[in-house]
C-alpha cells in the first residue's frame, strides 16, 4: 500500500509486523520488524535463479546480434546481457518483454542492401 504522504514509500502490514519499502531513483531500502516477510519480498523483487539458463543465454545472444539492425534495443539488451552468468526469473521476464516489443515493431529497423555502395559520409555542424 502506498503512503498517503510520500509516493515512494510503501507499507505492508502483516500479522507479524510491518514492512517498509522506500524507493529513490535507483536505490531501494527494505526494512521492518517482519523478517520472514522481508525475505519473501526480497525474493519476489530479485527473482529466483533459473534452473536451466541456456535458453536465456541463447535469447540474449540472438538479441545482441539483432542490435546491428535495431539499435533502439541496444541499452535493454546491454542490461540483460550483464546477467548471463547467473540469470534470475526477473531477467528472463525482461528478455521476454524485449521480444514482445520487437514483435510489435517487426518492420522497424535499419535496412542494408547488398547493392549499396560502401561509402562513408559524415556531416558536421561546426559554427
Image (tube, helix red, strand yellow):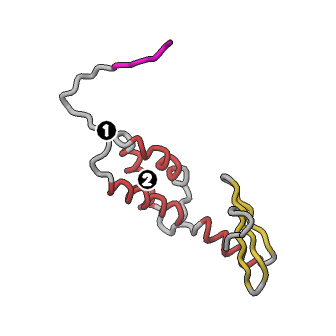
What residue is drawn where x is 72% and y is 73%? Answer: 11
Q: Which residue is mark 1?
A: 110
What residue is drawn where x is 40% and y is 18%? Answer: 123
Magenta-colored span: 121-127
Left or right: residue 42 versus residue 32 is left
Relative depth, front residue between 81 and 105: 105
Q: Which residue is mark 2?
A: 60
Q: Is residue 123 magenta?
A: yes
Left or right: residue 58 versus residue 38 is left
Give the image quarter of residue 74: top left
Q: Is residue 61 magenta?
A: no
Give the image quarter of residue 119: top left
Toward the right, the furthest residue is 33
What residue is drawn where x is 27% and y is 48%? Answer: 107
Q: Can you tell which of label 2 and label 1 is closer to the viewer?
A: 1
Left or right: residue 111 versus residue 123 is left
Label 1: how many Cα within 10 Å (few below 14, some 14–19, many 20+): few
Label 2: how many Cα within 10 Å (few below 14, some 14–19, many 20+): many
Secondary structure predominantly adopted by residues drawn in magenta: loop
Q: Position of residue 110 (x, y in %)?
A: 31, 38
**Against 62, is 29 above or below?**
below
Relative depth, front residue between 36 and 12: 12
Is the Cβ of the residue at disc 2 closer than 8 Å to that at disc 1?
no
Toward the front, the furthest residue is 4
Dot 1: element: loop
Dot 2: element: helix
Relative depth, front residue between 21 and 127: 127
Amino acid at each position: 500500500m502506498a503512503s498517503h504522504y510520500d509516493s515512494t514509500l510503501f507499507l505492508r502490514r502483516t500479522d507479524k509486523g510491518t514492512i517498509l519499502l522506500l524507493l529513490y531513483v535507483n536505490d531501494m531500502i527494505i526494512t521492518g520488524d517482519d523478517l520472514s516477510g522481508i525475505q519473501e519480498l526480497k525474493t519476489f523483487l530479485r527473482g529466483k535463479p533459473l534452473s536451466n539458463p541456456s535458453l536465456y543465454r541463447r535469447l540474449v545472444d540472438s538479441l545482441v546480434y539483432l542490435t546491428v539492425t535495431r539499435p533502439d534495443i541496444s541499452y535493454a539488451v546491454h542490461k540483460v546481457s550483464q546477467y548471463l552468468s547467473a540469470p534470475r526469473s526477473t531477467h528472463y521476464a525482461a528478455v521476454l518483454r524485449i521480444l514482445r516489443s520487437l514483435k510489435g515493431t517487426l518492420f522497424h529497423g535499419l535496412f542494408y542492401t547488398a547493392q549499396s555502395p560502401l561509402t562513408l559520409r559524415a556531416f558536421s555542424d561546426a559554427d
